[in-house]
Amino acid sequence: MSSLLSDLASARSAGMPFGITSVCSAHPVVLRAAIRRARLDGQPVLIEATCNQVNHLGGYTGMTPADFVRFVETIAEEEGLGRDRILFGGDHLGPNPWRKEPADSALQKAAAMVEAYVKAGFSKIHLDASMGCAGEPAALDDDTIARRAAALAAIAEKAAREAGLPMPLYILGTEVPVPGGADHVLDVVEPTAPEAAEATIAIHKTIFEEAGLAEAFARVIAFVVQPGVEFGSDNVVAYQPDKAAALSAVLTRQPQLVFEAHSTDYQTDAALAALVRDGYPILKVGPGLTFAYREALYALDMIAGELVRDYGDRPLASAMEALMCAEPADWQAHYHGTDAQLRLQRHYSYSDRIRYYWNRPDAESAVARLIGALNGVVIPEPLLRQYLGGLPLAAIAGQPAKEILITAVDQVLASYARATAAHSISR
């Protein structure tokens, strides 16, 4: 399975590029949709957990890496997908969750986290030491980042050997987009300068070799760069191939590598396929999936108000508003504006900070009430058209609410599946 990732560069060099969707989410409906699509398509699925989401101390999901693997495996077993069809990746593994601590403390925790990820069976490891810790600049120089990444790689190598597991594949890079999207309106995002990308590759190679990690560096499959795609709270910056052409050309001089594209959420089919064609075949998506989930939930919330006596007027949305206002830490620093603008962003922002709340008891209770209210209710087609018109009627007519939610997420995954398929990509 890991050979699939190793083949990305050679396939591109041979003029037959293909890609893979990196599903960056811990939401059970998103994971179920991704696993079901993999089973139906006969394709592998790459599922990634981030350092804040899942770590050796629990992360905001409360799951360790081993817990997360078991969680995904349970869903896969229910859906009939074999474990050998699942690739696990660790995203932004480094000191980010502890960056407010001194570097020594943060890096010790990062090392323990990397060890836990590798021993749990994560085979794609994105090492991200690009952020400064307490008392350091917010953005570090390439030399410091590379040395910290090499130290974390040494931990990963040792962990894999001790556990008798295949050696990890690595993603490196210093120009890493903000996880989860930007927190302000963006008119344009400039691609990484080609000379900066080449310098980053060169310094990592040198430092890894000096540290006795040449074999590990040979398993680096991609560097994270900025191809010019991003989303903020209210807008999406579309991929422009011409602007990224010079950056893509770096890969002709580094044919053993590809680039990894973060924040590809909300891009069009054509833009996603162009990213794969141009050397960014690992397409990471997360908030765009939970955004689709929230869209469908809110539509069902309105449908239940129309159909179910005593359900009320959008009680799910009201419950989420109360929850986010009572516990603002996960959105407050990211959303800006008047009270009215903040209310809209809490629910409808492309950044989808609401995704941090779905696993809290009040949210779970409100979702369960909605699903229960619609249990056994056949939703009339005109209401499906009114509130869920973006979904194919044939796929959702007569379906229970839980299946409608999976279909909504799958619509996004289908876009990525079309874009990453080798036969759909043309030069």
Image (cartoon, grey):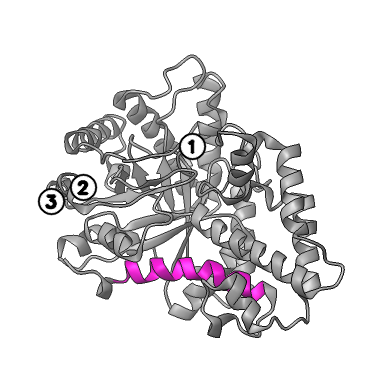
Compared across the picture, whether 158 is left or right of 399 comes to: left
Q: Say if residue 110 shows up in the picture.
A: yes
- What is the x, y in percent for residue 208? 29, 34
Quadrant of the rendered structure where residue 154 is? top left
Q: Which amino acid type corresponds to the residue marked 3 in the rendered image?
A: Thr
- What is the x, y in percent for residue 31? 57, 63
Quadrant of the rendered structure where residue 106 is? top right
Disc on the earlier residue, 3 or 2? 2
Quadrant of the frame with the N terminus? bottom left
Residue for badge 1: 183
Residue at (47% x, 40% y) in the render: 93
Q: Secondary structure at mark 1?
A: loop
Q: Is residue 56 above or below residue 289?
A: above
Residue for badge 2: 244
Comparing 121 with 302, the one in front is 302
- What is the x, y in percent for residue 248? 19, 49
